[in-house]
Amino acid sequence: ALYFHGKPFGFLSIMGFIGLSGVVVNDSIVLIDFMNRLRRSGMERRASIEESCKSRFRAVIMTSVTTVAGTMPMAYGWGGDDPFIKSMALAFTWGMAFASTITLFAIPCFYAIVDDISVKIFKHSSI
């Protein structure tokens, strides 16, 4: 986003990435915690992944949409333009739009891969 908008990669854009990582980690924790709860209740891995993605889809999308909608005016200067904040808001806004889709697809895949590896290495049944 910074490249396409001709903005420099500086300190404030790095601060945007740091803020973005906090929101993305929160979305991932919500998804993984729900998967683990379903598995502890006796559901098998694939079913728990599918159910958690269906159940938490709205929470992840609503968090992402409201965050992107809230930072768009800063990123594009609607209502006033602040060149210092603009690069941070661009990094945060477009990073959030990209990361929310990645969260819904990559996190369940990584969850299954890590579970397979832990079962093979540590020779124990998964949760």
Image (spheres, helix red, strand yellow):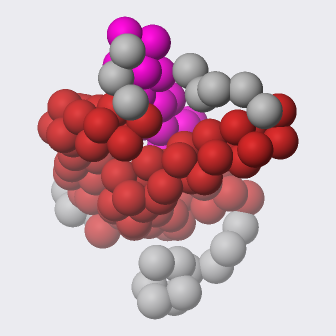
Most extreme residue toward the right is 121
Percent coordinates x, y for residue 19 in the rendering: 56, 42
| Residue at horizontal 64 percent and vertical 46 percent from the top | 116
On screen, residue 18 versus residue 99, left or right, reads right
**Residue at position x 46%, y 78% from top?**
1
Total labels drawn: 0
Magenta range is 22-41
Q: In this image, 93 relative to 11: left or right?
A: left
**Residue in front for this viewpoint, 107 or 93:** 107
Q: Is residue 23 left or right of residue 97?
A: right
In-front residue for pair 27/65: 27
Q: Nearer the viewer, residue 116 or 19?
A: 116
Residue at 27%, 58% in the rendered image: 72
Quarter the C terminus occupies: top right
Looking at the image, residue 35 lies above or below residue 94: above
Q: Position of residue 8 (x, y in %)?
A: 64, 79
Of residue 47 and residue 83, the one placed in the foreground of this image is 47
For residue 86, above or below residue 37? below
Q: Is residue 50 magenta?
A: no
| Residue 19 appears anywhere in the view | no
Looking at the rendering, which quadrant does residue 122 occupy?
A: top right
Q: Quadrant of residue 76?
A: bottom left
The answer to whether residue 104 is seen in the rendering is yes
Residue farthest to the top?
41
Task: Indicate the position of residue 44 as horizontal and vertical percent values.
Answer: 38, 30
- Classified by dominant secondary structure, the portion drawn in magenta counts as helix
- Residue 28 lies in the magenta-colored region: yes
Q: Position of residue 89 (x, y in %)?
A: 44, 57
Height in image: 77 above or below 45? Answer: below
